[in-house]
Amino acid sequence: MPSAIMDSPSAVTVPAASRASPLLSAMFLLFAGLVLMRIGLTPLLLDLAINYTADQGSIAEKLHPALYGFVLVGFLGLICFRLALDAWEVRVVRAILAFVGGLIVLILAATLAGRGGNAGFLIDTYAGACFCVLLFLFPPAWRNVVGQVVVGWLVISAIVALVEFGLKIRFQPFTETEYSFRPIGFAGHPLDLGLWTAVALCFCAATDWSRRTKLAVGAILLVALGASGARLALMVGLTSALIIAIAATGSGLSARKRLEWRIIALTGAILVVPFIIGALYAAGALDRFQGGIADSNARARVDIYRVFDYLSWQDILFGTDIAWVRKIARDRLQLEFIESSIVIFVSQFGVIGTLFFVSLFAWLLRVLLTGAKPAVLLGTLVFFIVILSSNGLSSKGSSVFTLLTLIVAFRPDSKRGQVRR
């Protein structure tokens, strides 16, 4: 499809005047609203109205409502505008088409094996994430606005989490029992709050906000990160914040002066960190560290890999019934949840299917990240370090969509023009 668009004589770059037409402006507002809907309507909120994550219910209920809106925006874009994509955008579209094709193959294989019902998250989480390509309908400056809106939403979520922490109440439904209070903000779960607060620290640096605004937002995010109780996210987030702060120090100075100022900044950070930790501890935000890092929750994330001891080589290579694997985890290992996306993917699709999926997803990310800003690269790295410690990549949610949208939105502007093959 991309090749046909590029080769068509009528496929020309849309002039700036027409790109700012009322129709495109309305589509942009609709798209931005749908992005916030996709991120803000968490599975627990949707379950209050529809059977989003439940086993019962119609197929239509299993997809996030925002996805239907994205289909409408895409349809309007195809019939109302003819756009010429630049070289990077063409590569992204091709990678997304290949990725979606791979998802179809994986779902068909699971369906033929009688396990298609358990693979539904691939459509909602991963195929749905590919709607980030709709950003190509809009000028680069408009895409950047979407990225800033998403980061702004994550900042507001962090502020709400701080209010929750202070009042010791949550404003959204939360069903899990915990021995110490952890806020959720707009994220739906403390781990998700920690993940996106840590990621927002990096993507905040990719915005064109003033340095003063970035410092203020960074301070809010760091405090909220401590309040989230997400230990890995806190450690990774603090490290990334330190890297960003040092990298931004001394910009515009000579190499020697820049090095001197960065040494001063690093020394200051080392002196300030103990005071920050002390303040968080006094506020009760570090209660989950009292049992050490290797507590029962951390051990559960390691012990879950023992489930492979009860599977045959055929099960490991080609996959098996995930319900049976969950029963093994519950009855044999005394683990209520499988908090590992690796275990879930291998159990459902086998090592062969998992490697096939990872290869396509890694290729898509490689294409998306080509030429990306350093802060975007760091934010992506932080995302995967944190989310791989849970089952966030193998369950319904907006995490993958949010990441891909931020990557595309903060892509540095390049000279646009028609690409011919």
Image (cartoon, helix red, strand yellow):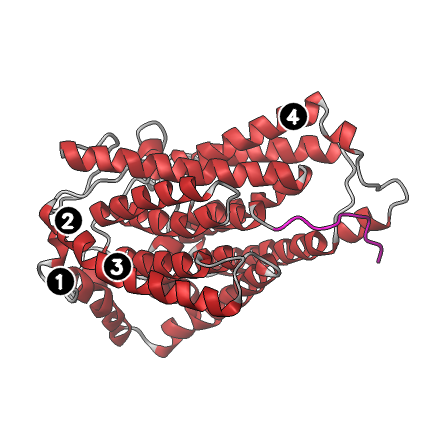
Please name the amino acid that badge 2 sits on: Ala
Q: Taking 203 as reference, is 185 left or right?
A: left
Residue in the image at 45% along x and 36% along y: 38
Give the prevailing secondary structure in the magenta stretch: loop
Q: CA distance from mark 1 to mark 3?
A: 19 Å
Residue 173 visible? The answer is yes
Is label 2 in a helix, a strand or a loop? helix
Please name the amino acid that badge 1 sits on: Ser
Disc 2 to disc 3: CB gap under 8 Å: no
Work out whether 5 lies above or below 246.
above
Instruction: Out of 374 and 396, give the one closest to the viewer.
Output: 374
Membership of 109 in magenta stretch = no
**The C terminus appears in which quarter of the rendering?**
bottom right
Instruction: Between label 1 and label 4, give the one nearer the viewer.
Output: 4
Instruction: Between label 2 and label 1, give the one nearer the viewer.
Output: 2
Q: Which residue is mark 4?
A: 25
| Residue extent of the magenta highlight | 412-421
Disc 1 to disc 3: CB gap under 8 Å: no
Q: Which mark is residue 279?
A: 2
| Of callouts 3 and 4, the N-terminal one | 4
Q: Taking 74 as reference, is 383 left or right?
A: left
| Of callouts 2 and 3, the N-terminal one | 2
Work out whether 85 lies above or below 137.
below
| Of callouts 1 and 3, the N-terminal one | 1
Q: CA distance from mark 2 to mark 3?
A: 40 Å
Residue 8: horizontal and vertical position, in percent?
A: 87, 46
Work out whether 20 lies above or below 202.
above
Please name the amino acid that badge 3 sits on: Arg
Q: CA distance from mark 2 to mark 4?
A: 46 Å
Q: Which residue is mark 3?
A: 326
Work out whether 42 lies above or below 121.
above
Residue 180: horizontal and vertical position, in percent?
A: 11, 46
